Image: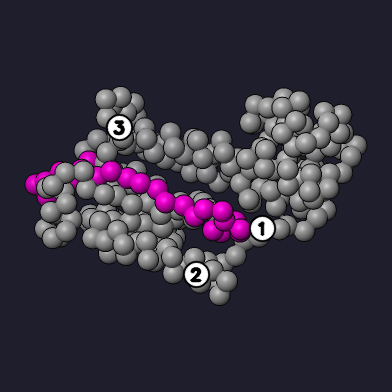
Protein backbone atom coordinates (compact mmCIF):
# COMPACT_ATOMS: atom_id res chain seq x y z
CA UNK A 1 0.00 0.00 0.00
CA UNK A 2 1.32 3.43 -0.98
CA UNK A 3 1.14 6.11 1.70
CA UNK A 4 0.80 9.67 0.41
CA UNK A 5 3.08 12.05 2.32
CA UNK A 6 1.24 14.76 4.25
CA UNK A 7 1.54 18.18 2.66
CA UNK A 8 2.91 21.13 4.56
CA UNK A 9 -0.47 22.84 4.34
CA UNK A 10 -2.35 19.93 5.87
CA UNK A 11 0.30 19.67 8.62
CA UNK A 12 -0.13 23.34 9.51
CA UNK A 13 -3.91 22.98 9.51
CA UNK A 14 -3.79 19.81 11.61
CA UNK A 15 -1.52 21.37 14.24
CA UNK A 16 -3.56 24.58 14.28
CA UNK A 17 -6.70 22.60 15.05
CA UNK A 18 -4.82 20.49 17.59
CA UNK A 19 -3.79 23.69 19.36
CA UNK A 20 -7.35 25.01 19.04
CA UNK A 21 -6.34 28.14 17.22
CA UNK A 22 -8.34 29.97 14.58
CA UNK A 23 -6.68 31.04 11.36
CA UNK A 24 -6.78 34.59 12.70
CA UNK A 25 -5.05 33.56 15.95
CA UNK A 26 -2.25 31.78 14.11
CA UNK A 27 -1.87 34.43 11.43
CA UNK A 28 -1.50 37.19 14.02
CA UNK A 29 1.01 35.16 16.02
CA UNK A 30 3.08 34.31 12.94
CA UNK A 31 3.01 37.82 11.54
CA UNK A 32 1.05 37.09 8.38
CA UNK A 33 -2.45 37.54 6.99
CA UNK A 34 -5.32 35.11 7.29
CA UNK A 35 -5.46 35.08 3.48
CA UNK A 36 -1.84 33.97 3.19
CA UNK A 37 -2.30 31.38 5.95
CA UNK A 38 -5.39 30.06 4.18
CA UNK A 39 -3.39 29.76 0.94
CA UNK A 40 -0.66 27.84 2.82
CA UNK A 41 -3.16 25.42 4.35
CA UNK A 42 -4.90 24.86 1.01
CA UNK A 43 -1.66 24.33 -0.89
CA UNK A 44 -1.99 27.49 -2.96
CA UNK A 45 1.15 29.05 -1.45
CA UNK A 46 4.47 27.57 -0.36
CA UNK A 47 5.71 29.12 2.89
CA UNK A 48 9.31 30.26 3.21
CA UNK A 49 11.60 28.71 5.83
CA UNK A 50 11.25 31.90 7.89
CA UNK A 51 7.45 31.66 7.79
CA UNK A 52 7.60 27.99 8.78
CA UNK A 53 9.85 28.90 11.70
CA UNK A 54 7.30 31.48 12.88
CA UNK A 55 4.42 29.06 12.45
CA UNK A 56 6.28 26.34 14.35
CA UNK A 57 7.11 28.78 17.12
CA UNK A 58 3.54 30.01 17.55
CA UNK A 59 2.15 26.48 17.33
CA UNK A 60 4.69 25.46 20.00
CA UNK A 61 5.77 22.50 17.90
CA UNK A 62 8.45 20.09 19.09
CA UNK A 63 11.69 20.52 17.15
CA UNK A 64 11.12 17.18 15.43
CA UNK A 65 7.87 18.46 13.93
CA UNK A 66 9.37 21.80 12.93
CA UNK A 67 11.85 19.83 10.84
CA UNK A 68 8.96 17.82 9.36
CA UNK A 69 7.29 21.05 8.28
CA UNK A 70 10.47 22.12 6.51
CA UNK A 71 10.86 18.75 4.79
CA UNK A 72 7.22 18.74 3.67
CA UNK A 73 7.78 22.16 2.08
CA UNK A 74 10.91 20.95 0.28
CA UNK A 75 13.50 22.52 2.58
CA UNK A 76 16.32 20.94 4.56
CA UNK A 77 15.72 20.40 8.28
CA UNK A 78 17.58 22.77 10.58
CA UNK A 79 17.42 20.95 13.92
CA UNK A 80 18.21 17.33 13.11
CA UNK A 81 18.46 14.14 15.13
CA UNK A 82 21.93 13.28 16.44
CA UNK A 83 22.94 9.93 17.89
CA UNK A 84 23.41 10.33 21.62
CA UNK A 85 26.78 8.58 21.44
CA UNK A 86 28.07 10.88 18.66
CA UNK A 87 31.00 13.23 19.20
CA UNK A 88 28.75 16.29 18.85
CA UNK A 89 26.67 15.11 21.80
CA UNK A 90 29.63 14.61 24.16
CA UNK A 91 28.89 17.79 26.19
CA UNK A 92 25.25 16.68 26.58
CA UNK A 93 26.22 13.16 27.67
CA UNK A 94 28.69 14.59 30.17
CA UNK A 95 26.04 16.97 31.53
CA UNK A 96 23.52 14.15 31.87
CA UNK A 97 26.05 12.02 33.74
CA UNK A 98 26.94 14.92 36.05
CA UNK A 99 23.27 15.50 36.89
CA UNK A 100 22.60 11.79 37.46
CA UNK A 101 25.64 11.45 39.72
CA UNK A 102 24.60 14.57 41.58
CA UNK A 103 21.30 12.96 42.61
CA UNK A 104 22.97 9.82 43.97
CA UNK A 105 22.28 7.97 46.21
CA UNK A 106 18.71 8.81 45.22
CA UNK A 107 17.46 7.23 41.98
CA UNK A 108 17.56 9.18 38.73
CA UNK A 109 17.21 8.08 35.12
CA UNK A 110 17.64 9.76 31.74
CA UNK A 111 15.01 9.04 29.07
CA UNK A 112 14.46 10.03 25.46
CA UNK A 113 11.21 11.25 23.92
CA UNK A 114 9.78 7.71 23.79
CA UNK A 115 10.62 7.09 27.48
CA UNK A 116 13.46 4.74 26.59
CA UNK A 117 16.08 4.74 29.33
CA UNK A 118 19.43 5.98 28.01
CA UNK A 119 21.29 6.28 31.32
CA UNK A 120 20.77 5.91 35.07
CA UNK A 121 22.66 6.33 38.31
CA UNK A 122 23.44 3.71 40.93
CA UNK A 123 20.35 4.68 42.96
CA UNK A 124 18.10 3.01 40.39
CA UNK A 125 18.72 -0.31 42.18
CA UNK A 126 15.63 0.34 44.30
CA UNK A 127 13.43 0.16 41.18
CA UNK A 128 14.93 -3.04 39.79
CA UNK A 129 14.45 -5.43 42.71
CA UNK A 130 11.98 -8.18 41.81
CA UNK A 131 11.47 -6.99 38.22
CA UNK A 132 11.41 -9.88 35.74
CA UNK A 133 14.30 -10.05 33.30
CA UNK A 134 12.13 -9.62 30.19
CA UNK A 135 11.14 -6.12 31.37
CA UNK A 136 14.82 -5.25 31.83
CA UNK A 137 15.88 -6.39 28.36
CA UNK A 138 17.13 -3.34 26.42
CA UNK A 139 15.74 -1.08 25.21
CA UNK A 140 14.06 -0.49 28.58
CA UNK A 141 10.98 1.69 28.52
CA UNK A 142 10.72 3.52 31.85
CA UNK A 143 6.91 3.71 31.86
CA UNK A 144 6.53 0.04 30.95
CA UNK A 145 9.00 -0.83 33.71
CA UNK A 146 6.91 1.18 36.17
CA UNK A 147 3.38 -0.02 35.34
CA UNK A 148 3.89 -3.55 33.99
CA UNK A 149 2.45 -6.22 36.33
CA UNK A 150 5.80 -8.03 36.14
CA UNK A 151 7.68 -4.80 36.63
CA UNK A 152 7.51 -2.29 39.45
CA UNK A 153 3.70 -2.16 39.74
CA UNK A 154 3.23 -4.88 42.40
CA UNK A 155 5.46 -2.90 44.79
CA UNK A 156 3.72 0.46 44.31
CA UNK A 157 1.47 0.97 47.33
CA UNK A 158 -0.53 3.77 45.68
CA UNK A 159 -0.63 2.13 42.24
CA UNK A 160 -4.01 3.53 41.13
CA UNK A 161 -2.95 7.04 42.05
CA UNK A 162 0.48 6.71 40.43
CA UNK A 163 -1.07 5.20 37.29
CA UNK A 164 -3.41 8.17 37.08
CA UNK A 165 -0.43 10.52 37.29
CA UNK A 166 1.65 8.63 34.69
CA UNK A 167 -1.19 8.12 32.20
CA UNK A 168 -2.36 11.72 32.56
CA UNK A 169 1.15 12.97 31.90
CA UNK A 170 1.45 10.71 28.86
CA UNK A 171 -1.85 12.03 27.46
CA UNK A 172 -0.53 15.58 27.74
CA UNK A 173 2.72 14.57 26.02
CA UNK A 174 0.79 12.95 23.16
CA UNK A 175 -1.28 16.12 22.75
CA UNK A 176 1.88 18.22 22.65
CA UNK A 177 3.81 16.03 20.20
CA UNK A 178 1.19 14.15 18.18
CA UNK A 179 3.41 11.06 18.51
CA UNK A 180 1.80 7.85 17.20
CA UNK A 181 4.42 5.83 19.09
CA UNK A 182 3.45 7.41 22.40
CA UNK A 183 -0.22 6.84 21.58
CA UNK A 184 0.52 3.13 21.11
CA UNK A 185 2.43 3.12 24.39
CA UNK A 186 -0.54 4.72 26.14
CA UNK A 187 -2.88 2.04 24.78
CA UNK A 188 -0.55 -0.66 26.10
CA UNK A 189 -0.11 0.90 29.54
CA UNK A 190 -3.80 1.71 29.99
CA UNK A 191 -4.62 -1.98 29.47
CA UNK A 192 -2.47 -3.06 32.43
CA UNK A 193 -4.32 -3.80 35.69
CA UNK A 194 -4.17 -1.47 38.66
CA UNK A 195 -6.97 1.05 38.25
CA UNK A 196 -6.66 4.78 37.97
CA UNK A 197 -7.38 7.27 40.73
CA UNK A 198 -7.39 11.04 40.88
CA UNK A 199 -4.59 12.63 42.93
CA UNK A 200 -5.19 13.86 46.47
CA UNK A 201 -6.04 17.53 46.03
CA UNK A 202 -4.67 18.29 49.51
CA UNK A 203 -1.19 17.07 48.54
CA UNK A 204 1.12 19.41 46.57
CA UNK A 205 2.38 16.52 44.40
CA UNK A 206 1.65 12.85 43.75
CA UNK A 207 4.21 10.81 45.72
CA UNK A 208 5.53 7.44 44.64
CA UNK A 209 4.96 5.01 47.55
CA UNK A 210 7.17 1.99 46.98
CA UNK A 211 7.18 -1.14 49.14
CA UNK A 212 10.70 -2.18 50.11
CA UNK A 213 10.87 -5.15 52.45
CA UNK A 214 9.06 -4.13 55.65
CA UNK A 215 9.25 -0.45 54.73
CA UNK A 216 7.38 1.92 52.48
CA UNK A 217 9.57 4.39 50.64
CA UNK A 218 7.95 7.72 49.85
CA UNK A 219 9.52 9.65 46.98
CA UNK A 220 8.77 12.84 45.09
CA UNK A 221 9.59 12.97 41.38
CA UNK A 222 11.15 15.89 39.52
CA UNK A 223 11.93 16.38 35.83
CA UNK A 224 14.97 18.17 34.39
CA UNK A 225 15.22 19.17 30.72
CA UNK A 226 17.77 21.17 28.75
CA UNK A 227 17.08 24.83 28.10
CA UNK A 228 17.22 26.21 24.54
CA UNK A 229 18.04 22.91 22.77
CA UNK A 230 19.33 23.17 19.21
CA UNK A 231 18.65 19.61 18.07
CA UNK A 232 15.84 17.09 18.43
CA UNK A 233 17.87 14.63 20.51
CA UNK A 234 18.68 17.20 23.19
CA UNK A 235 15.15 18.62 23.15
CA UNK A 236 13.65 15.21 23.87
CA UNK A 237 16.05 14.22 26.66
CA UNK A 238 14.72 14.38 30.21
CA UNK A 239 16.09 13.37 33.59
CA UNK A 240 13.58 11.89 36.02
CA UNK A 241 14.77 12.02 39.63
CA UNK A 242 13.13 10.61 42.76
CA UNK A 243 13.85 12.37 46.03
CA UNK A 244 13.02 11.16 49.56
CA UNK A 245 9.88 12.67 51.06
CA UNK A 246 10.55 11.59 54.64
CA UNK A 247 13.54 10.86 56.91
CA UNK A 248 13.06 7.07 56.82
CA UNK A 249 13.19 6.99 53.02
CA UNK A 250 16.29 9.18 53.04
CA UNK A 251 18.02 6.86 55.51
CA UNK A 252 17.15 3.68 53.59
CA UNK A 253 18.19 5.05 50.20
CA UNK A 254 21.37 6.47 51.60
CA UNK A 255 22.33 3.23 53.32
CA UNK A 256 20.81 0.70 50.88
CA UNK A 257 19.14 -1.27 53.65
Among numbered discs 1 and 2, the one appearing first in the sequence? 1
* Residue 147: x %, y % from top left: 34, 43
Task: Classify residue 180 by image quadrant.
Answer: top right
Among numbered discs 2 and 3, the one appearing first in the sequence? 2
Which type of secondary structure does the marked residue at label 3 adopt? loop
Residue depicted at x 83% and y 53%: 74
Which type of secondary structure does the marked residue at label 1 adopt? loop
Q: Could you say which is closer to the camera, residue 62 or residue 156?
A: 62
Which residue is denoted by mark 3 in the rendering? 204
Question: Residue 91 bears which disc, if any?
Answer: 2
Q: Could you say which is closer to the camera, residue 37 or residue 213?
A: 37
- Extreme residue toward the bottom, this view: 87
Q: Which residues are magenta?
A: 209-234
Residue depicted at x 80% and y 55%: 75
* Residue 24: x %, y % from top left: 76, 25
Question: Residue 239 bears which disc, if any?
Answer: none
Among numbered discs 1 and 3, the one appearing first in the sequence? 1
Residue depicted at x 33% and y 56%: 108
Q: Is residue 230 highlighted in magenta? A: yes
Q: CA gap, disc 2 to disc 3? A: 34 Å
Which residue is denoted by mark 1 in the rendering? 79
Q: Residues within 10 Å of mark 2 (few under 14, many from 20)?
A: few
Q: CA gap, disc 1 to disc 2? A: 17 Å
Which type of secondary structure does the marked residue at label 2 adopt? helix
Q: Is residue 255 visible?
A: yes
Mark 1 vs mark 2: give the one in front: 2
Vertical order, 173 against 109 (above or below): above
Q: CA gap, disc 1 to disc 3? A: 37 Å
- Extreme residue toward the right, this view: 44
Amino acid sequence: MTVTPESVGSMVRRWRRERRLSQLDLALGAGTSTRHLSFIENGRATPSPAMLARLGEHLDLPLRDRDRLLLAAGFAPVHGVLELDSAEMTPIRDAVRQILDGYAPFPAIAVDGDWTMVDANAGVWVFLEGVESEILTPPINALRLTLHPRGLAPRIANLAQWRGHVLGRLIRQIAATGSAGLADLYTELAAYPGGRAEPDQHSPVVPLRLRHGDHELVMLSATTVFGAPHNVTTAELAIESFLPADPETRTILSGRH
